[in-house]
Image (tube, grey):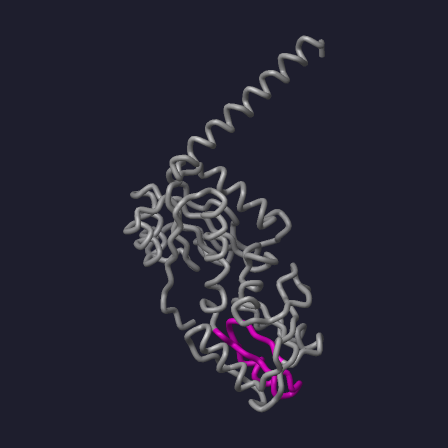
Amino acid sequence: MLKSECKNLRHKQILRLECEAVFEDRYKERNMALRREILAWCDEILQVGLFKDYAPNGLQVEGKEEIAKIATSVTASKAAIDFAVEQGADMLLVHHGMFWKSEPVTITGWKKARIETLLQHQINMAGYHLPLDAHPQLGNNAQLAEKLDWVLEKQFGEQNLLNTGRLKTTQTLVQLSERIEAVFGRKPTVIGNLEREIKRIAWCSGGAQGFFQTAVDESVDAYLTGEISEAQYHLANETGVAFISAGHHATERYGVRALGDAVAEKFGIEVVHFDENNPA
């Protein structure tokens, strides 16, 4: 390439960057951001490329390009979508989206109703699943430790979804259960000796009861997750490691809130949060 061509190319690149900067500043002054900017930032912060997931991460339903208001919710339920409509939101940011590998691909019934409402109101729907579980600050697991005042020791296991840590003050299992109930607003299912002292704990938000044996192998005193199956009752009694099921929804309501708040701070746009009284 000739020197003159290189010079012209550099000049064009500088002009493009300057135009983009002016364009982005104009949106910030209006408390608005472009959809692609928000999604690119979320993708980078959450490192979505590192995860093998069974749901798409990022944009799932396309709406307006300009985003002035975001609603967050654990799940892209019809109630959450209706809330986004009522709030005049341009994007619904969730942990559980609508397209899962285990589900039929046809858009009928409840799925049609959800998508139809989003499209009618030009609301974007973006979801972040495993990347939002595992993020060391914004993630569901990190937020659980913060809410329950636990000290994180390490992330480990499948895709770094498991966590071990310790309680700042040793508690009996019944005291820990009461603390969890006070924070989550729901009584957890607890299997184990209620008088046992709990010092070290492992946890993974959501439906991670299948990781219980991995947690047991870490020589912890208790394991917390969102769901319980029949087998965990026996494993808890036979190993002496307490099992705590605190609710799938309850253990995953804080990550998407933290992500929404981070987006609000980064882009200067309004973010509102939606929650449901989901007992599961």
Q: How many marks?
A: 0
Is residue 235 something one can see in this rendering?
no
In what quadrant of the picture does the N terminus appear? top right
Residue placed most toward the observer, 196 or 115:
196
Identify the residue at horizontal 55%, vertical 19% (top origin). 15
The image shows residue 126 at horizontal and vertical percentages of: 45, 48
> Considering only vertical position in the picture, is 32 above or below 168?
above
> Considering only vertical position in the picture, is 46 above or below 169?
above
Q: Which residues are magenta?
A: 222-246
> Considering only vertical position in the picture, is 17 above or below 94?
above
Is residue 35 something one can see in this rendering?
yes
Residue placed most toward the observer, 230 or 18:
18
In the image, taking residue 160 as reference, residue 94 lies left or right, namely left
Q: Quadrant of residue 97?
A: bottom left
The image shows residue 10 at horizontal and vertical percentages of: 64, 18
In the image, taking residue 54 as reference, residue 269 lies left or right, namely left
Q: Quadrant of residue 149?
A: bottom right
The image shows residue 91 at horizontal and vertical percentages of: 39, 46
The image shows residue 198 at horizontal and vertical percentages of: 62, 82
Does the magenta portion include 134? no
Does the magenta portion include 230? yes
Identify the residue at horizontal 59%, vertical 21% (top origin). 14
Q: Quadrant of residue 27?
A: top left
> Considering only vertical position in the picture, is 33 above or below 219?
above
In the image, taking residue 219 as reference, residue 65 lies left or right, namely left
In what quadrant of the picture does the C terminus appear? bottom left
